[in-house]
Image (cartoon, helix red, strand yellow):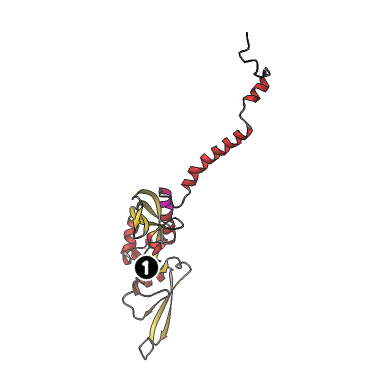
Amino acid sequence: MKDARGPNCPVNDDPEKMAMNDRPPRSFRRSGAALALLALALPLAGCSDPKAASDDNFKSALQGWFDTNPVCTTLVAMGKVPIVREVPNHVDEAKLDLAVNAGLLSVESFREVPRFATKPADFRRYTPTDTGKDAIRANDTGLGGVQLCFARRNVVEVVNWTEPGDVMGLRATQVRYRYRLDDIAPWTQTADMRAAFPQLAKALDTPEGEDKASLILTNEGWAHERSLRK
């Protein structure tokens, strides 16, 4: 049988050499591997972008907020920590005594001359204990008062969200999510505590639910809109 190759073509009948000649150049193989790695890295880079509009980023932003901002109710409407009240105190005394009995507050009595008065009066100072230091906190929303915190929202799932748009110069979206209450304080289970704090009782009666929140795009990524008020 005649060789179909022309007279000027080199003849190589060694199968091993022929297989080697069929391989692509080494530089081509290296560049091909690099392109493959780049193709894998691009979608991963997109997924890890904290500024992208995605379920994962929105869930992370919500959970980050709830981890540092637990579920609370009002302990006293006015004042700061430690809580000082003149005796007798008919407005807050019952709630404060419950917090003392639960081991959240310690109380000490003292006498001093009130402002604009000339005679000393009896006072009580309520200070958070080691047990209560995470539960008793000042209300930092600008309304004043002291809060009693008893649980934490755990974001179970992002249900849906609006297309991010510009709102008063900020990039914002509204996210609807499902949650459940975790880390519920054991002192919440007494009948007296539930009766004194109706909001606490209502929250514990519905430990799972659905809610919505507005998120704002910042330089670091998405954040709860309430974090911008602080």
Residue that badge 1 annotates:
141
Q: Quadrant of residue 135?
A: bottom left
Q: Is residue 5 left or right of residue 135?
A: right
| Residue found farthest to the bottom | 118
x and y, in percent, of residue 162 in the image: 33, 50
Say if the magenta span includes residue 138: no
Q: Quadrant of residue 223?
A: bottom left
Q: The disc labelled 1 sits on which kind of residue?
A: Thr
| Number of disc labels | 1
Q: Is residue 156 above or below residue 25?
A: below
User: Looking at the figure, which quarter contains the N terminus?
Assistant: top right
User: Looking at the figure, which quarter contains the C terminus?
Assistant: bottom left
Visible residue check, residue 207: no
x and y, in percent, of residue 19 in the image: 64, 23
Visible residue check, residue 7: yes
| Residue found farthest to the front | 8
At numbered mark 1, what does the secondary structure look like: helix, strand or loop? loop
Q: Which residues are magenta?
A: 56-60
Number of residues whose C-alpha sits closer than 10 Å to that of mark 1, classed few (under 14), some (14–19) or many (20 or more)? few
Foreground pick, 10 / 156: 10
Residue that appears at 34% across and 62% down: 200
x and y, in percent, of residue 180 in the image: 38, 53
Q: Is residue 118 above or below residue 149?
A: below
Is most of the magenta stretch helix, strand or loop? Answer: helix
x and y, in percent, of residue 192 in the image: 34, 66
Q: Is residue 45 left or right of residue 142?
A: right
Q: Is residue 12 left or right of residue 152?
A: right
Residue that appears at 42% across and 68% down: 136
Foreground pick, 183 / 144: 144
Q: Quadrant of residue 140?
A: bottom left
